[in-house]
Image (spheres, grey):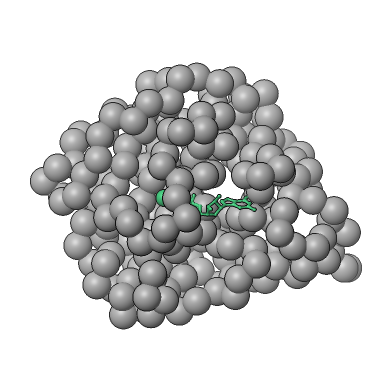
């Protein structure tokens, strides 16, 4: 059987997803409550956490803003590689969203190891309340060695992660089909990867409701 034809990032995996639950969760006030630059600055979790990871400039901060409908919540910038800290946001006392530092600015697996060995790996491994890592991949760009290195690291940390494509407004429906199939195949090859892939655009809103609903199941 061939893949069904898709025209946008939305509805394909919608069956069973409670979009209303996602809407209600993300309609709540979300506020920044602290940043950690080292492991000793981490405070005890308030409850379930979802962390957003991905290469610098992939659209992490923009996605957190789109999900919460708060434009200036997580700082989005055109200048990659700036934030080297974990930023914690409290969503209605139900879910903590964690904006992780971008990796692979230098685009080398080696750089990922160096960046992620300390704080990030400690955080990922030692956080029982971390429900899922949302791993963002730019739909326009081929996977880099740094992406593979992070997926391997997440497998080793045994943290469930979910692949989310970003910036799908920048590609054709046909290219998106191919990218989605590629991401699914990739997820199947990784022990800790969740099988579903969500395709999003913070620009058009495609996939945002779906991702809210997916995350609402975890909080
Ligand atoms: N066209 C388009 N641009 C996006 C999208 N998401 C993010 N961007 C742009 O990509 C750049 C990097 O986004 P940012 O959120 O700062 O990336 P981060 O480094 O991963 O936090 C910014 O210029 C954003 O406006 C999207 O869905 N579509
Ligand atoms: Mg950012």
Q: Tell me: 125 left or right of 210.
A: left
Whole-percent x, y for residue 6 in the image:
84, 56
State which quarter of the image contains the N terminus: bottom right
Q: Quadrant of residue 114?
A: bottom left
Q: Is residue 14 above or below residue 195?
A: above
Q: Is residue 123 visible?
A: yes
| Depth check, front residue: 103 or 22 | 103
Q: Residue at x 62, y 34 (%)?
A: 213
Q: Tell me: 118 left or right of 197.
A: left
Give the total of numbered labels: 0
Q: Is residue 154 above or below residue 62?
A: below
Q: Residue at x 66, y 44 (%)?
A: 203
Q: Residue at x 26, y 50 (%)?
A: 85
Q: Is residue 114 above or below residue 101?
A: below
Whole-percent x, y for residue 132 in the image:
44, 47
Whole-percent x, y for residue 51 in the image:
40, 46
């Amino acid at each position: 059987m061939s893949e069904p034809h898709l025209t946008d990032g939305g509805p394909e995996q919608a069956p069973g997803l409670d979009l209303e639950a996602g809407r209600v969760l993300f309609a709540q006030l979300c506020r920044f409550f602290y940043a950690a630059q080292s492991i000793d600055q981490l405070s005890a979790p308030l409850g379930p956490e979802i962390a957003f990871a991905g290469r610098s400039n992939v659209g992490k901060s923009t996605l957190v803003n789109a999900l919460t409908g708060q434009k200036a919540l997580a700082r989005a910038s055109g200048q990659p590689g700036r934030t080297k800290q974990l930023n914690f946001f409290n969503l209605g006392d139900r879910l903590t969203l964690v904006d992780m530092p971008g990796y692979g600015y230098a685009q080398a697996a080696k750089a990922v190891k160096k960046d992620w060995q300390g704080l990030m790996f400690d955080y990922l491994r030692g956080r029982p309340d971390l429900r899922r890592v949302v791993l963002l991949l730019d739909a326009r760009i081929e996977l880099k060695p740094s992406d593979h290195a992070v997926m391997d690291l997440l497998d080793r940390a045994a943290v469930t992660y979910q692949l989310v494509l970003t910036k799908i407004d920048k590609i054709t429906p046909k290219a998106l089909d191919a990218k989605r199939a590629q991401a699914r195949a990739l997820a199947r090859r990784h022990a800790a990867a969740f099988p579903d892939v969500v395709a999003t655009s913070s620009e058009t809103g495609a996939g945002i409701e779906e991702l809210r609903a997916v995350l609402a199941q975890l909080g």
